[in-house]
Amino acid sequence: MVALTSVSPALLGADRGAATEDGKVIDEIFVTAQKRVERLQDVPMSISVLEGDTLDRSVQGMREALTRSPGVATIDTGTGTTQLTIRGVSGPGVNQGSSPVGYYLDSAPFAMIRNSPVPDSNAYDLDRVEVLRGPQGTLYGASSANGVVRVLTKDADLKNFGMKARVTGSSTTDGGDNFRGDMAVNVPIIEDKLAARAVVGYEDWSGWIDRPFRKDANGSEIRNMRLKVNAQPTDALSVGLSAWSSRSDFDNRDASTDRRTYVSRVNEPQAVDYDVYGLKVGYDFQAVTFTSATSYLDFTNAATLDYEAIFGAAFANTLLLSQFDSQVFSQEFTFSSTSDGPWRWTAGAMYRDAKDKFFQWRRQYLNPKGNRFYDTSESVAVFGELTRRLADDRLELTGGLRYFEDKVVTHETARTSDPNATLVTVDDKFDAVSPRAVVTWHWNDSLMTYASYAEGFRSGFSQQPIVLLSAPSLPPIDADNLINYEIGSKGSVWDNRLSFEVAVFYIDWQDIQQQLTIQAISGTGSAFTVSAGVNGESASGLGAEFGLNFRPVEGLLLGANFGWNDLTMDADVFSGTTLVFKKGDRITNSPEYTAGVSADYTFPVGSRGYEAVVSTSASYVSLREARALIGGQSTVLVGDNILTARLNLGVNSPDGWSAALFVDNLTDEDGTPIPTPDAYGHIRLRPRTIGLQLEYHY
C-alpha cells in the first residue's frame, strides 16, 4: 500500500533512517516541498508522500495514486487527462481556466493558461510524489492556489548499475485482455561523475463499452519514455538533464450508460501527447545553495466528438474535431540558506512564457477554417521566505511573500460563423501579492503543531470567442484569490508504531472561477452546448482532514485517511438574469467527503528468505455536482458517490523476483464521478480488472 502520513514505514532517498543508541532504526522521510531538504516531520503544512517503490507494485497511474491522499479527488475527463481536486477546490474544466492545483514533473510546471487537466502520468520508477495541501502561492506561484502535486523521478545513480522490469497481464469485466510492460535501466558512465537512467513503458488496455458498430470500443494504447542524465563535476556543482515523452491514443471516450453501451455509430478517437524537457543546475556555496530550473513543455490534446449522439437527429453526420496545443517555457532561480543557525531563508525569481492554441471544426461551419484562437501569457514573479528559530529551536516563526504579474492576450484567428468577420484581440493584465505566515511549535523530535495563514492566486482570462457568439453578455473571467487559515499537528508515538497528521482549516475563496455549460443555437436553428467561465462572488467553508499509519505488530501496517470540507457559495451567482448558483450551493466538481483505508501484511514463507504480501485498500469520494444553462434555465447535474477497492496477493523472492495477483475495482463500481449534460452516457470507471504482475530487480 502507499504510505500517506507524515512518518512513513518505507524509506526514501539516501537519508532513509537513523539508528538510536539501542540499535533501533527510526524511519525518516526527507522532502523538498519548501525548496530545501527537510525532514517531513518538520514541515509545517499538510503534506503526504507517496513512495516510489510502493507505487511500482500497487498502482496503474498517478490518477489512482493521488486518491490515497487525504482530501484529494481526481476526475478522468474522458479525454485522457485528469482534473485534480484538493479540499473541494477544483479546476473549472477544459478551456475554462488554469488549475488551482499545481502539478510538477520534477522541476517542470504542467500549467497552462486556460486549461486545468493534467496527464495521468506513468507512476513507474519514481522516487516519490509529494502532495502539498493548502495554498502554496509564496513558493510555487499562480498555479497552486490550493495545493501542489510534485511527481519526482529517480536521479541516475552515479556509482551502481541497476535494472528492473515488470510485466502485467489482466482481464477486464465486460471487456478483454490487457497488457503492460515497464523497464528501468541505470548506467554509470563515469563513476561518481556521470550517469544515465532510462525508463520505458507500454500499455495496451481493452475497451469495455459497446457501440452499435463495435464491441469493447474504448480501448487505448499508451507509450512512455523517460531519460535522466545526472552529472557531479565537483562536490559543489550538480547538473541534471531530463526528458519525458508520452503518447496516448484512445479509440473512444470512456462514456456510457449504466449498461456499458453508447449510442454513437462512429469512432470518437482521442489523443494526448506531451514532451517535457528539463535542465537543473545546483551549486553549493557552503552558506548558500543556488538552483536554476529550466523547463519546456509541449502538450497536445486532439479529440473527435459525435454531435448526433449527444444532441439528436438535428446533428446527423456531424463530427466536431478539436485540438488544443500548449507550449510553455519556464525559468526559475532559487537561493536557499544552509546554516544551522537561528535564521533560515529562501529567495528566488521566476519567468514563464506560454502559448495555448485552440482549434475546432465541423463541416457545417460557414467558415471552412473553423474556430481558431490562441492565448499568450508572459509572467514574472519574485518570492522570498524567512524563518526565525527561538526557544531552543522549539518555536519557529515564518513569513513569506510573492509578487506575481501576468500579461494575457487572446487572439481570434478564425470565426466559425463568418469567414469575413472582424476578429477579436483582447489584452489583459493580472497581478497579485501572495503572503504566508506560519507559527510552529516543536514539542520534541516526533511531535509538532503549527498555525498558518496562506494565500493562493490564479490569473484571469477572456471568454472564448465562440462563447461570446452564444452569450455576448458574459463578462471576462477575473482573477481569483484563495485564503486559507489552518491549524495542524503531525507526529509519531509508541516507538513510531503510530504516525499521524491532522488539520483543521477555513477556506475563503474570492471571485471564484467556475465552469458553466450554455445551450446555444446554431445558424441552422439547432441546439448545441458550449462551456463558459463565470466568477462567483466568493465561496467559503470549514474543513478537516487526518491521515494515520499504525503498525501494531511487525509486518502489519494499517492506514486510514479522511477529508471533509463545507466549501459552498457565499451568495447567489447569476448569468445575466438567470440564477446559476444559490447561496449555500457546492461549487462545481467539489466532493464534500473523501476517505480511504488500507492494510499491508508481510510475513516470511519457509526458511529461504521468501516473503508473502497481502495488501488491500479502499477509497471513497462523495458525489459531485455541475451546472448547465439549458434553454435559459439553470440545471443541476449530479454525479455518484464512488467507492473503489483493490486487493493484492504477492510473493517476494530473495533473488529479486516477485509475483502478485491483483484485483482492481474490486467492487466493480460503475457510477459516474463527473456529471455531464450528455443524456446517452457519462464518464465511467474501468470495471473490475483481475491480473498477474511479475517484477524483477537486479
Image: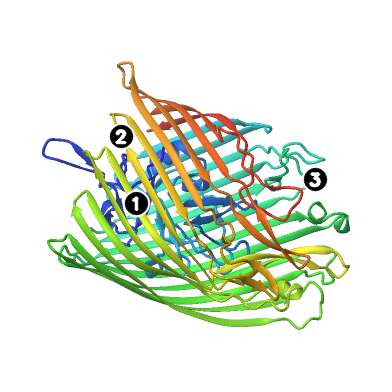
Q: Which residue is disc 3 drawn over? A: 263
Q: Which residue is disc 1 drawn over? A: 502
Q: Which residue is disc 2 drawn over? A: 551
Viewed as shown, does residue 264 lie left or right of 685?
right
The amino acid beneath tag 2 is Arg
**Residue, x 50% and y 34% (percent of image)?**
646
Q: How far from the left and from the top, in percent, is residue 356?
A: 60, 69
- Helix, strand or loop at label 2? It is loop
**Residue, x 74% and y 70% (percent of image)?**
371
Closer to the camera, 381 or 595? 595
Name the quadrant of the N terminus: top left
Q: Nearer the viewer, mark 3 or mark 2?
A: 2
Q: How far from the left and from the top, in percent, is residue 385?
A: 30, 70
Measured Cα–Cα span from mark 1 to mark 3: 47 Å
Q: Are marks 3 and 2 in contact (CB under 8 Å)?
A: no
Q: Earlier in the sequence, mark 3 or mark 2?
A: 3
Q: Is residue 122 above or below residue 315?
A: above
- Helix, strand or loop at label 3? It is loop
The amino acid beneath tag 3 is Val
Other-residue count near label 2 (Cα within 10 Å), few / some / many at <14 / 14–19 / ≥20:
some
